[in-house]
Image (cartoon, rainbow, N blue to C red):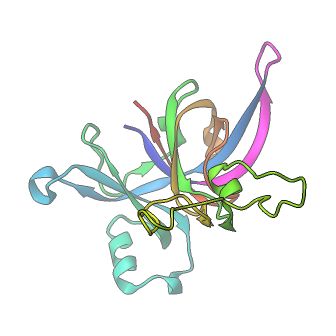
Amino acid sequence: MAALIGKKIGMTQVFTEDGTRVPVTVIEAGPCPVTSVRDPERDGYSAVQLAFGEAPEHKLTKGELGHLKKADAGPLKTLVEFRDPDTEHAIGEVLTVEQFEPGQRVKVSGVAVGKGFQGTIRRHNFGRGPVSHGSHNVRAPGAIGASATPSRVFKGLRGPGRMGGGRVTQRRLEVVEVIPGENLLLVRGAVPGPRNGTVEVRTDG
């Protein structure tokens, strides 16, 4: 399984040989040094830990700096483990976008853009009430429980609240182009997160 940590640069478009316009997201992926390898006999599972994103040295603890030093890596702010039972990696090995190739399917994980407190129409796609004859139920959620039975509101009822800001994984995205010289990965369609947000890219299926 190929996997990398990257940064979402933004969206643009590319044109294929037949003139078709393809919307793509540009991801600056890697290079990511391998900072730790999990062994099934020792740790109980198989995984590889990657690091990404330069950070000022004074913002990391001595323990974090010592952990990165074992892999001959500088101060990096993001560490992510990828479950990888098939591929063998060594500590200190550097992974790049050359792992991927055009046409390959990948899944991208990131933290979605937070929308703040939203009502039921935007958050859950509820319908709206009548807007004529003096109605005050224009964007209200309507009745949410009977007064006599059950005399309460059931748990889990969809209502207004905080929207977005959670971890999202977009699957079955196609790699359109790989630019190794600039560590860029062009993926068809949109990926989770804001511009300059950290994302995880790995092969899908």
Q: Quadrant of residue 197?
A: bottom right
Residue 89 vs residue 163: left or right? left
Horizontal and vertical percent position of residue 78: 48, 66
Q: Looking at the image, is 195 positioned above or below residue 172?
A: below
Q: Give the camera-side residue of 121 and 135.
A: 135
Name the residue: 59% across, 31% down.
Answer: 175
- 182 up-or-down from 121: above or below: above
Compared with 3, 165 (above or below) is: below
Q: Would residue 115 appear left or right of 62 to someone viewing this image?
A: right
- Residue 157 in the magenta stretch? The answer is no
| Highlighted magenta segment, given as a residue range | 7-20
Q: Residue at x 62, y 45 (%)?
A: 191
* Magenta residues, dominant SS class: strand
User: Residue 29 at what x, y percent from top left?
Assistant: 57, 49
Residue 199 seen in this snapshot: no
Query: Which quadrant holds the C terminus?
Result: top left
Q: Quick one: 91 or 105, which is closer to the camera?
A: 105
